Amino acid sequence: MAELVAEGARSISGTEVRVRSVAEATPDDVVWCDGIAVGSPTNMGILSWQMKRFWDETMGPHWMKVDGKIGCAFSSAGGWGGGMELSCQSILTVLMNFGFLTFGVTDYSAKLHTAHYGAVALREPRDEVAIAGCKLLGRRLAEWTAVFCDGRKELHPVLHPDTRLGAN
C-alpha cells in the first residue's frame, strides 16, 4: 500500500517522496517531511503495536518539531469488518496529538468506494479499487502539501476541480 500511496504522491510535480517501514523510520524522516502518509496493518481494530511504539518512544522526544505538518492514514486487514477504518482513525488520532493537520478524501476512487478516513484494502491491495484508493490518497496528500506548504494554490482540489483525479 505504501508504494501505491507514494506513486500517487509522485504524480504531483515537485513532490519528493521517501518510503520507510516503521522498523527503519527515524525522527529525521518525520521532521524532514511536510506531509506524511502513515500506514499500519489493522491489529484488533487499531494501529499495530509497532506503529504505536514508534510514536510513543521514538517520536515522543521530538514533540512540537512536527506541529502543523499534514498527515493521512492507510490500513489493511485480513477480512472485511476487521476494523480498517478504525485503524485509520487511530493513526489520525496519534498524528493529531502530534499537531498534524489531518484530512479525509471526499472523492470516490471507484464506484461506492471512498477514502474518507484513509485508504483501506483487504489484505494486499491487488484489485483496481484498492489500488485506486491508495493512489488517490497519495495524490491528495501531495496536493494539500503543495497548496499549504508551497503556496501552489492551482493544485487546490476544491478551488480547481479540474485537477481532481479522473477529471481529464
Image (spheres, rainbow, N blue to C red):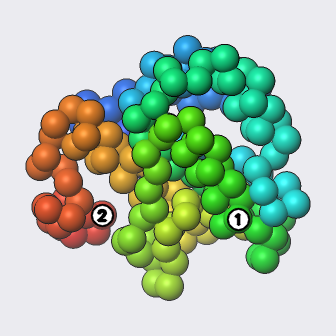
Q: Is residue 89 left or right of residue 100?
A: right
* The quadrant where residue 43 appears: bottom right
Of 62 and 9, which appears nearest the observer?
62
Task: Calculate the distance from the C-alpha at mark 1 to the C-alpha at mark 2.
Answer: 25 Å
Say which residue label 2 marks: 165
Mark 2 lies on a secondary structure that is loop
Side (left or right) of 127 relative to 9: right
On the image, which quarter does residue 61 sit in? top right
Residue 45 shown left or right of residue 84 in the figure: right
Which numbered dot is residue 30? none
Residue 67 placement (x, y as % from top left): 46, 31
Q: Which residue is mark 1?
A: 86
Point 16% across, 36% down: residue: 151
Quarter holding the C terminus? bottom left
Farthest residue in the bottom direction?
A: 112
Residue type of the residue flagged with mark 1:
Leu
Task: Please report whichever mark, 1 or 2, sits nearer to the chain's N-terminal start.
Answer: 1
Q: Position of residue 129 (x, y in %)?
A: 54, 71
